[in-house]
Amino acid sequence: MKTNEGGLDRVLRIVAGLVLLGLTLNGNIGAWGWIGVVPLATGALGMCPLYTLLGLNTCPVQRKS
């Protein structure tokens, strides 16, 4: 698995995931808030399968050809 998320991207995903999960557990939003697991997991792993499919990469590290 290659990293395809940069530092800021990862932090934003983790924060968004935690906010969604927190709001769900608090009862402020419905069950759809459990979708926060996805950005939390992708942010923690540093790899987004959708980015791979779309050919995106926000990681600043240069790839070797």
Image (tube, rainbow, N blue to C red):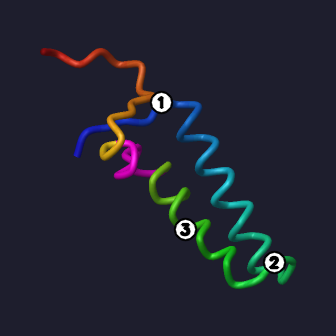
In-front residue for pair 65/10: 65
**Residue 20, image x and y in percent?**
71, 66
Q: Is residue 12 above or below residue 64?
A: below
Q: Nearer the viewer, mark 3 or mark 2?
A: 2
Are dots 3 and 2 in contact, CB under 8 Å?
Answer: no
Are dots 3 and 1 in contact, CB under 8 Å?
Answer: no
Report the Cα–Cα distance between label 3 and label 1. Answer: 19 Å
Callout 2 environment at 10 Å: few (<14), some (14 to 19), or many (20+)?
some
- What is the number of callouts on the image? 3
**Residue 48, image x and y in percent?**
39, 48
* Residue behind mark 1: 6
Question: What amino acid is at disc 2?
Answer: Ile
Q: Where, by quadrant of the figure, is residue 57 drawn? A: top left
For numbered disc 3, what is the local secondary structure?
helix
Q: Residue at x 45, y 53 (%)?
A: 42
| Residue farthest toward the right in the current orientation of the protein | 28
* Residue behind mark 2: 29
Question: What amino acid is at disc 3?
Answer: Val
For numbered disc 1, what is the local secondary structure?
loop
Callout 1 environment at 10 Å: few (<14), some (14 to 19), or many (20+)?
some
Which label's residue is closer to the chain start, 3 or 1? 1
In-front residue for pair 49/11: 49
Report the Cα–Cα distance between label 3 and label 2. Answer: 15 Å
Placement of the C terminus among the 4 image quadrants = top left
Report the Cα–Cα distance between label 1 and label 2. Answer: 29 Å
- Range of residues picked out in magenta: 44-51
Question: What amino acid is at disc 1?
Answer: Gly
* Residue behind mark 3: 37
Q: Nearer the viewer, mark 1 or mark 2?
A: 2
Which label's residue is closer to the chain start, 3 or 2? 2
Q: Classify residue 41 as left or right of residue 28.
A: left
**Residue 18, image x and y in percent?**
67, 61
